[in-house]
Image: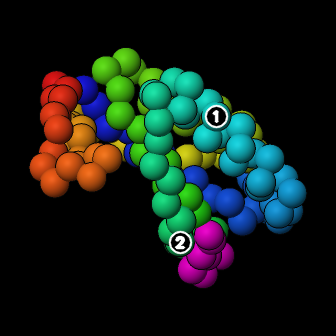
Protein backbone atom coordinates (compact mmCIF):
# COMPACT_ATOMS: atom_id res chain seq x y z
CA UNK A 1 0.00 0.00 0.00
CA UNK A 2 1.22 3.50 -0.82
CA UNK A 3 0.38 6.99 0.32
CA UNK A 4 0.41 9.60 -2.44
CA UNK A 5 0.64 13.23 -1.34
CA UNK A 6 0.13 15.85 -4.02
CA UNK A 7 0.85 19.48 -3.17
CA UNK A 8 -0.32 22.15 -5.61
CA UNK A 9 -0.74 25.91 -5.81
CA UNK A 10 -4.21 27.44 -5.84
CA UNK A 11 -3.39 31.14 -6.13
CA UNK A 12 -2.23 31.51 -9.73
CA UNK A 13 -1.99 29.38 -12.86
CA UNK A 14 1.24 28.73 -14.78
CA UNK A 15 0.84 31.99 -16.71
CA UNK A 16 0.58 34.06 -13.52
CA UNK A 17 -3.18 34.61 -13.80
CA UNK A 18 -5.08 34.66 -10.52
CA UNK A 19 -7.35 31.65 -10.07
CA UNK A 20 -10.80 33.05 -9.26
CA UNK A 21 -12.85 31.69 -6.37
CA UNK A 22 -15.38 30.22 -8.84
CA UNK A 23 -12.63 28.51 -10.87
CA UNK A 24 -11.00 27.16 -7.71
CA UNK A 25 -14.27 25.87 -6.29
CA UNK A 26 -15.12 24.06 -9.55
CA UNK A 27 -11.61 22.62 -9.96
CA UNK A 28 -11.44 21.40 -6.35
CA UNK A 29 -14.83 19.72 -6.74
CA UNK A 30 -13.54 17.82 -9.80
CA UNK A 31 -10.26 16.97 -8.04
CA UNK A 32 -12.02 15.67 -4.91
CA UNK A 33 -14.42 13.60 -6.99
CA UNK A 34 -11.57 12.07 -9.02
CA UNK A 35 -9.51 11.34 -5.89
CA UNK A 36 -12.45 9.66 -4.15
CA UNK A 37 -13.25 7.56 -7.22
CA UNK A 38 -9.62 6.51 -7.73
CA UNK A 39 -8.67 5.85 -4.10
CA UNK A 40 -11.96 5.46 -2.27
CA UNK A 41 -11.37 8.66 -0.30
CA UNK A 42 -8.94 11.49 0.34
CA UNK A 43 -7.67 13.99 2.89
CA UNK A 44 -7.20 17.62 1.87
CA UNK A 45 -5.18 20.22 3.77
CA UNK A 46 -4.70 23.94 3.21
CA UNK A 47 -1.10 25.09 3.33
CA UNK A 48 1.30 27.74 2.02
CA UNK A 49 4.20 27.08 -0.33
CA UNK A 50 7.14 29.23 -1.31
CA UNK A 51 10.02 29.26 -3.75
CA UNK A 52 12.65 31.61 -5.09
CA UNK A 53 11.58 33.14 -8.41
CA UNK A 54 13.77 33.91 -11.39
CA UNK A 55 14.38 37.41 -10.03
CA UNK A 56 15.70 36.03 -6.70
CA UNK A 57 12.65 37.07 -4.69
CA UNK A 58 10.62 34.81 -2.41
CA UNK A 59 7.25 33.93 -3.92
CA UNK A 60 4.58 32.51 -1.61
CA UNK A 61 1.26 31.04 -2.63
CA UNK A 62 -1.73 29.42 -0.99
CA UNK A 63 -1.57 25.72 -1.69
CA UNK A 64 -3.43 22.50 -1.03
CA UNK A 65 -2.17 19.07 -0.10
CA UNK A 66 -4.23 16.10 -1.23
CA UNK A 67 -3.48 12.73 0.35
CA UNK A 68 -4.75 9.38 -0.94
CA UNK A 69 -3.89 5.78 -0.08
CA UNK A 70 -4.06 2.98 -2.62
CA UNK A 71 -2.60 -0.37 -3.63
CA UNK A 72 -2.72 0.88 -7.23
CA UNK A 73 -0.13 3.21 -8.82
CA UNK A 74 -2.47 6.20 -9.10
CA UNK A 75 -0.19 9.02 -7.94
CA UNK A 76 1.10 10.29 -11.27
CA UNK A 77 -2.31 10.02 -12.96
CA UNK A 78 -3.94 12.00 -10.16
CA UNK A 79 -1.10 14.57 -10.13
CA UNK A 80 -1.51 15.14 -13.87
CA UNK A 81 -5.27 15.55 -13.45
CA UNK A 82 -4.76 18.15 -10.69
CA UNK A 83 -2.13 20.05 -12.68
CA UNK A 84 -4.38 20.22 -15.72
CA UNK A 85 -7.47 21.17 -13.68
CA UNK A 86 -5.67 24.20 -12.24
CA UNK A 87 -3.42 24.94 -15.26
CA UNK A 88 -0.26 24.46 -13.19
CA UNK A 89 3.22 24.04 -14.72
CA UNK A 90 4.05 21.46 -12.03
CA UNK A 91 2.69 19.90 -8.86
CA UNK A 92 4.66 17.99 -6.22
CA UNK A 93 4.01 14.25 -5.88
CA UNK A 94 5.35 12.35 -2.87
CA UNK A 95 5.04 8.56 -2.74
CA UNK A 96 5.53 6.55 0.45
CA UNK A 97 5.25 2.84 1.11
CA UNK A 98 3.09 2.46 4.20
CA UNK A 99 0.71 0.39 6.23
CA UNK A 100 -2.68 1.66 7.32
CA UNK A 101 -5.29 0.40 9.69
CA UNK A 102 -8.86 1.67 9.87
CA UNK A 103 -10.04 1.36 13.44
CA UNK A 104 -13.79 1.19 13.80
CA UNK A 105 -14.60 3.20 16.89
CA UNK A 106 -17.43 2.83 19.38
CA UNK A 107 -20.82 3.16 17.73
CA UNK A 108 -24.44 3.31 18.76
CA UNK A 109 -23.70 3.83 22.44
CA UNK A 110 -21.22 0.97 22.84
CA UNK A 111 -18.23 1.87 24.97
CA UNK A 112 -15.62 -0.32 23.24
CA UNK A 113 -14.37 -0.49 19.67
CA UNK A 114 -16.20 -3.04 17.55
CA UNK A 115 -13.49 -4.19 15.10
CA UNK A 116 -10.55 -3.05 13.06
CA UNK A 117 -9.33 -3.88 9.58
CA UNK A 118 -5.70 -3.77 8.54
CA UNK A 119 -4.43 -2.97 5.02
CA UNK A 120 -0.89 -3.79 3.88
Locate residue 79 relative to residue 96 in the image: left or right: right
Q: Look at the image and give the residue range highlighted in magenta.
A: 55-62
In magenta stretch: residue 59: yes
Label 2, on which residue?
48
Give the class, few, some or many, for how many residues have Cα within 10 Å of label 1's Cα (few <14, many ≥20): some
Mark number for residue 33?
Answer: 1
Which residue lies most toward the left here?
112
Which residue lies most toward the bottom here?
57
In magenta stretch: residue 87: no
Q: Is residue 95 above or below residue 118?
A: below
Q: Main secondary structure of the magenta part?
A: strand
Q: Quadrant of residue 77?
A: top right
Query: x, y (%) of residue 49?
Result: 52, 68
Residue drawn where x is 56% and y is 25% of the image? 37
Q: Is residue 77 above or below residue 91?
A: above
Locate residue 65 relative to residue 11 in the image: left or right: left
For the N terminus, the image quarter is: top left
For the C terminus, the image quarter is: top left
Helix, strand or loop for disc 2: strand
Query: x, y (%) of residue 47?
Result: 51, 68
Residue drawn where x is 61% and y is 41% of the image? 32
Query: x, y (%) of residue 113?
Result: 15, 45
Number of numbered markers: 2
- Closer to the N terminus: mark 2 or mark 1? 1
1 and 11: which is toward the camera: 1
Amino acid sequence: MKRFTITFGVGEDAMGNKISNDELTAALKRIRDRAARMAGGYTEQSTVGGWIGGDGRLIEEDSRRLIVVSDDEIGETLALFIGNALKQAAVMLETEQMQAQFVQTAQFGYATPVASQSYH
